[in-house]
Amino acid sequence: MEEILEIEALKQLKYKYFRCLDSKLWDELGEVLTDDATAAYDSGKYSYDGKPAILEFLSGSLGDREVISMHMGHHPEITLTGADTAEGVWYFEDYVIFTKADLRLRGAGFYRDRYRKVDGRWKIEHTGYARTYEEMQTADSGAKWSLTHYGDHLDSD
């Protein structure tokens, strides 16, 4: 039963990562990372060492109010590797709208994470993903679209 509770805590941790990312809650996102966390996004194309560097990259890439993102994690495969360590593989989907550039990015892939307990709480020690696909659509592609709702989550508690 204890193993199930630990795995559930790790699921909650990753869900919080995605929620904070899309809600632009950078301070709260920092709470889920170890101080010495590392990241290797897009097969290592964007790699960072340390919580400040990771948060700077994420807030710089997605922090503009005109960038709308949706990240979803599915089908976690979590393995407890020790009393205070674990690993996880997550299938993910993302959709990012860059309103100023009239550009949309959609894709999927697999996150590979390492977790470590710090002061009795699980944190992400390493995160990163490799894509299975990515697609982009721009205004000049001929497709018509409109943004019908956005922003309520940014102004709420």
Image (cartoon, grey):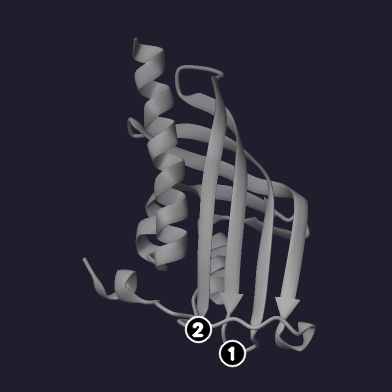
Q: Using residue 13 as the reference point, say whether residue 145 is left or right of it.
A: right
Q: Residues within 10 Å of mark 1 (few under 14, many from 20)?
A: few
Instruction: Tell me: residue 63, above or below residue 5.
Output: below
The local secondary structure at tag 1 comes to: loop
Q: Residue furthest left?
A: 157
Residue in the foreground of this view, choosing between 104 and 16: 104
Q: Using residue 53 as the reference point, say whether residue 18 is left or right of it.
A: left
The local secondary structure at tag 2 comes to: loop
Q: Using residue 40 as the reference point, say whether residue 94 is left or right of it.
A: left
Determine the residue positioned at 73% across, 75% down: 137
Residue denoted by label 2: 66
Residue denoted by label 1: 100
Give the image location of residue 70, x and y in percent.
51, 61
| Placement of the N terminus among the 4 image quadrants | top left
Give the image location of residue 143, x and y in percent.
70, 81
Instruction: Tell me: residue 145, above or below residue 95.
Output: below
**Residue contact at pointers 1 and 2, CB within 8 angstroms:** yes
Determine the residue positioned at 58% across, 75% down: 97
Badge 1 amino acid: Lys
Determine the residue positioned at 75% across, 85% down: 142
Instruction: Tell me: residue 139, above or below residue 5.
Output: below
